[in-house]
Amino acid sequence: VQLVESGGGLVQAGGSLRLSCAASGSTFHINRMGWYRQAPGKQRELVASIISVGGSTNYADSVKGRFTVSRDNAKNTMYLQMNSLKPEDTAVYYCNAVAVVGGITNYWGQGTQVTVSS
């Protein structure tokens, strides 16, 4: 599975961005996809995730009500709509896919920078 993120950039506080993560390869094995972020000097944290079958979603408390994760299965693409952005949302955002084939394998994208100016 290969993951390619896009859509990061610089935005003012209160603005919006939409991230995309395009998956290719053995995508039919993907059980769950998610967005993680890592700010300088901090650990990588889960932002939002979505289950492949059923579309159940999960969000970090810090982004609930502001971010929305979605997935277009026909395009094998996951999105993260980020509204009301805050300076503390500044981080590198990574796409993650969890594939279940015998065991569990995590795949990661290269990351995309999101910078929110105050």
Image (cartoon, rainbow, N blue to C red):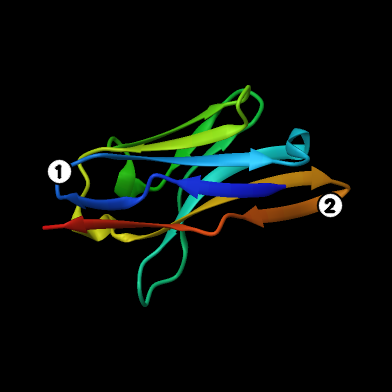
Query: Which residue is most to the bottom?
Result: 41
Q: Residue at x 63, y 40 (%)?
A: 23
Alpha carbon separation for disc pair 2 and 1: 42 Å
Query: Which residue is most to the right?
Result: 102
Residue 29, picture quadrant: top right
| Local crowd size for mark 2, using a 10 Å CA cut-off: few (<14), some (14–19), many (≥20) | few
Q: Residue at x 58, y 50 (%)?
A: 96
Q: How many marks?
A: 2
Relative to 67, 57 lies left or right: right
Residue nearest the viewer, comparing 1 with 105: 1
Residue 112, picture quadrant: bottom left
The amino acid type of the residue labelled 2 equals Gly
Tell me residue 40's x, y (percent).
Answer: 35, 73
Name the secondary structure under disc 1: loop
Circle on res. 14? 1
As displayed, is residue 117 above or below residue 5? below
User: Along the polypeptide, which appears first: circle 2 or circle 1?
Assistant: 1
- Residue that label 2 marks: 103
For discs 2 and 1, the disc positioned in front in the rendered view: 1
The amino acid type of the residue labelled 1 equals Gly
Relative to 26, 35 lies left or right: left
Name the secondary structure under disc 2: strand
Tell me residue 28's x, y (percent).
Answer: 76, 33
Tell me residue 74's x, y (percent).
Answer: 63, 22
